[in-house]
Image (spheres, rainbow, N blue to C red):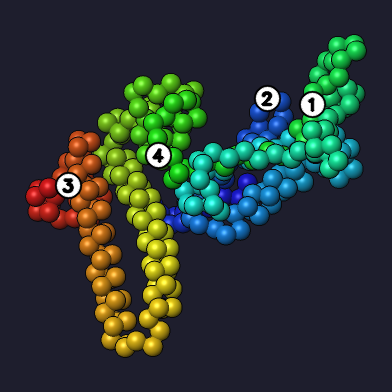
């Protein structure tokens, strides 16, 4: 798939990652990680699934060659009016006059498309909607509780970048090995720290920009006609506040990096704080 994750340097912002996988049944799974707000994100989800379907069937092939697609979307921004942190979407054909009647496949369709073996005299439970794509949305920033199952453990990792020693979810053990910072070379460790700091800064910029825009719009509506000097004063105040907030965030990051065992020089390179500032923490 088209990928925007291969920026030239770790300073490139607003990236997303697209990965296309195929399982043992020949079904496709799209994994997308999106860091920045996008009003048309739902449309792009639909487009991405449609493109995978059309790109993987040849002209003249029968329609039964259309393969199932799962779209897994990991987002780090507020999507729509989301309150939960995991959403599942799929197609369902429901009777208009008999709402409890969910359209199911025939036994023959179930055998042809899914390889099911239906016992004599029984009817398949396969729904017609099972042929269509399914979507999963993981709203990482909405997760604010203790992990109680495998999915929660993965979302906690996606949000914090840390893996609890008690985590048992499949795949997290391998991820923990990749995150063993102590085994990295000095250069690799510096690259990792800079990358994590850039991601944190990136999310902070996006959040700040959204909040400033909303606040400015509200203030403009209420303060229309007031003196230009007051507007300039507010702008200067916001700028000073952002600068102070960024400095506080750098110091908080430096404390975490020092706690992880990095040297003062490495922390200075990652956060752009002076050695004197770091020694005072």
In front of the other: 179 or 112: 112
Q: Is residue 76 left or right of residue 24?
A: left
For marks 2 and 3 on the same chain, the one whose residue lies earlier in the sequence = 2
Q: Residue at x 76, y 38 (%)?
A: 92
How crowded is the residue under tag 1: few (<14 C-alpha within 10 Å), some, or many (20+)?
some
The numbered mark at residue 126 is 1
The numbered mark at residue 189 is none
How far from the left and from the top, in percent, is residue 30?
62, 40
Q: Residue at x 82, y 33 (%)?
A: 101
- Residue 130 in view (yes/no): yes
Q: Nearer the viewer, mark 2 or mark 3?
A: 2
Q: Is residue 204 left or right of residue 58?
A: left
- Residue 55 in view (yes/no): no
How far from the left and from the top, in percent, is residue 191?
33, 45
Decide: is 230 above or below 5. below
What element does badge 3 sit on?
helix
The numbered mark at residue 144 is 4
Alpha-carbon span between mark 1 and mark 4: 36 Å
**Residue that numbered label 2 is attached to:** 24
**Residue that numbered label 3 is attached to:** 265
Q: Nearer the viewer, mark 2 or mark 1?
A: 1
Q: Quadrant of residue 220?
A: bottom left
Alpha-carbon span between mark 2 and mark 1: 20 Å
């Amino acid at each position: 798939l088209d990928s925007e994750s291969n920026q030239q340097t770790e300073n490139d912002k607003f990236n997303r990652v697209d990965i296309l996988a195929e399982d043992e049944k020949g079904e496709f799974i799209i994994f997308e990680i999106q860091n920045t707000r996008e009003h048309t994100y739902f449309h792009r989800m639909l487009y991405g699934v449609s493109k995978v379907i059309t790109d993987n069937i040849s002209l003249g092939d029968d329609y039964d060659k259309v393969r199932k697609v799962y779209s897994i979307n990991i987002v780090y921004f507020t999507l729509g009016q989301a309150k939960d942190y995991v959403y599942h979407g799929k197609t369902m054909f429901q009777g208009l006059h008999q709402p409890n009647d969910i359209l199911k496949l025939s036994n023959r369709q179930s055998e042809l498309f899914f390889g099911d073996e239906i016992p004599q005299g029984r009817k398949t439970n396969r729904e017609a909607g099972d042929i269509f794509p399914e979507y999963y949305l993981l709203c990482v920033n909405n997760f604010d509780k203790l992990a109680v199952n495998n999915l929660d453990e993965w979302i906690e990792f996606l949000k914090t970048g840390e893996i609890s020693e008690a985590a048992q979810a499949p795949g997290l053990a391998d991820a923990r090995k990749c995150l063993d910072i102590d085994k990295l070379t000095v250069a690799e460790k510096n690259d990792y720290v800079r990358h994590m700091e850039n991601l944190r800064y990136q999310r902070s910029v996006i959040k700040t920009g959204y909040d400033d825009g909303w606040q400015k719009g509200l203030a403009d509506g209420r303060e229309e006609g007031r003196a230009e000097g007051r507007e300039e004063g507010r702008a200067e105040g916001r700028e000073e506040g952002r600068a102070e907030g960024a400095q506080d965030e750098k110091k908080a990051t430096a404390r975490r990096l020092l706690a992880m065992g990095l040297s003062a020089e490495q922390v200075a390179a990652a956060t752009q704080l002076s050695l004197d500032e770091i020694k005072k923490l």
